[in-house]
Image (cartoon, rainbow, N blue to C red):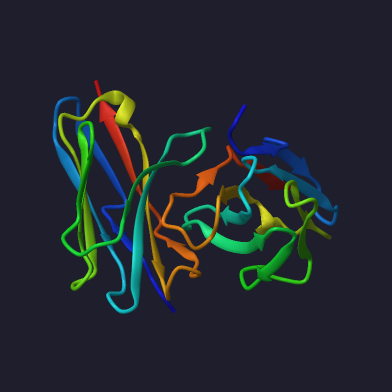
Amino acid sequence: ILNVEQSPQSLHVQEGDSTNFTCSFPSSNFYALHWYRWETAKSPEALFVMTLNGDEKKKGRISATLNTKEGYSYLYIKGSQPEDSATYLCAFKNGGSQGNLIFGKGTKLSVKP
Amino acid sequence: GAGVSQSPSNKVTEKGKDVELRCDPISGHTALYWYRQSLGQGLEFLIYFQGNSAPDKSGLPSDRFSAERTGGSVSTLTIQRTQQEDSAVYLCASTRDRGDNQPQHFGDGTRLSIL
């Protein structure tokens, strides 16, 4: 059974703090790694799709890195804002382009003003 | 709107009843996916459509669950004789094609509660 683990499960930070969370996935047969942000009562919104070992992607204050050899990705948020409060999901695709996305349980981030 | 649309947004029903959930994907997206998130769990894959056919139904948890897609567009997920363990948020997503490396576009979901 393929498993995607995310840690921590939840995180509470103060506005202005920088934070990061981890996504671990099986390193064999890697195809792609997705990150999504899911705010309550809204649809999950795509942040990044990463495919290459050593990839680094950035979108505003959010960035992500990828290590496919050891099977992990980090998501960083610099200077957290209350609007960053959401659940951050990672999803792993293996077995080639026709594989399914396998999601982790997410990291729930709460940013206090 | 140009996004994925799901209805209803909330559904409360009694155990044993049938429910039908609807998904209208982004126009031109041939690939459509159904997921569910039960309390404390990650997003769980249910079924994938390519056009009107469903080459991967491996995630459907029991034969009470079925789905169809017509005209390569709207999809309905039907749950017969609902049980309390079916309570979850059901999400639909679409992509232009399954094989590309584009992100999935999700709807807002249907929150299903079985009493």
Residue B61 location, quadrant: bottom right
Nearer to us in this view, A29 or B61: A29
**Is residue A52 shown above or below A47?**
below
Query: Could you tell whether B48 is left or right of B43 in the image?
Result: right
**Of residues A89 and B15, the one drawn nearer to the viewer in this rendering:** A89
Q: Residue A6: percent from the left, percent from the top? A: 31, 58
- Rendering coords of residue B8 (x, y %): 73, 36
| Residue A90: percent from left, percent from top | 36, 54
**Number of disc labels:** 0
In which quadrant of the rendered view does residue A27 lie? bottom left
Who is closer to the viewer here, B81 or B79?
B79
Task: Name the residue rendered at 73%, 65% in the picture.
Answer: B53
**Furthest-front residue in view?**
B28
Q: Decide: is A23 above or below A1.
A: above
Q: Is residue B108 above or below residue B17?
A: above
Q: Is residue A25 left or right of residue B58?
A: left
Along the horizontal axis of the image, is B86 left or right of A79?
Answer: right
Picture quarter with the N terminus of chain A:
bottom left
Give me the residue at 73% from left, 47% from top: B73
Picture quarter with the C terminus of chain A: top left
Give the quarter of the image for residue B59: bottom right
| Image point (33%, 25%), residue name | A83
